[in-house]
Amino acid sequence: MSVVLEVRNLDKSYGGVPVLKNVSFSLNAGEVVALAGENGAGKSTIFKIATGQVRPDSGTVIISGKPYERLDTLLSREAGIGIVPQELAPTRT
């Protein structure tokens, strides 16, 4: 299988509070993966970084072998990266 998304050595803090410390993982084409952990463990932050919504303090996001230093939501979408959130935003009725 080929690696389609990889994050290497991600660090992210908010207000001096570390959320991610040296996080690395990769996802292969055709693979189904679940990221599980307690509230506040950094799961959403990892995906926000991978989709260009948030910039890491340090680390690299690699999509299909191409490293991105300034990933944004448009580049991420064009590269085929998307997320399905656990909870959808409420809709108005």
Image (cartoon, rainbow, N blue to C red):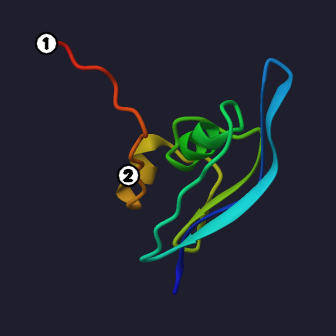
- Disc 2 marks a residue whose amino acid type is Arg
Q: Which residue is mark 2?
A: 77
Q: Position of residue 88 (x, y in %)?
A: 34, 31
Residue 93: mark: 1
Q: Is residue 52 left or right of residue 14?
A: left
Write the residue at 66% across / 31% down.
Answer: 39
Q: Are marks 2 and 1 in contact (CB under 8 Å)?
A: no
Most distant residue in the left direction = 93
Q: Position of residue 18 (x, y in %)?
A: 83, 31
Write the residue at 65% across / 52% down.
Answer: 69
Q: Quadrant of residue 25?
A: bottom right
Write the residue at 44% across / 51% down.
Answer: 75
Write the residue at 60% across / 43% down.
Answer: 49
**Crowding at mark 2 (Cα within 10 Å: few <14, some 14-19, many 20+):** few
Q: Is residue 39 left or right of residue 8?
A: left
Q: Is residue 59 left or right of residue 5?
A: right
Q: Position of residue 64 (x, y in %)?
A: 52, 72
Work out whether 12 lies above or below 77: above
Q: Quadrant of the C terminus?
A: top left
**Total labels drawn:** 2
Label 2 secondary element = helix
Q: Is residue 11 left or right of residue 29?
A: right
Label 1 secondary element = loop
Residue 55: mark: none
Most distant residue in the top direction = 93
- Disc 1 marks a residue whose amino acid type is Thr
Task: Compare marks 2 and 1 and give the one earlier in the sequence.
Answer: 2
The residue mark sitting in front, 2 or 1, is 1
Q: Quadrant of residue 79?
A: bottom left
Work out whether 76 lies above or below 88: below
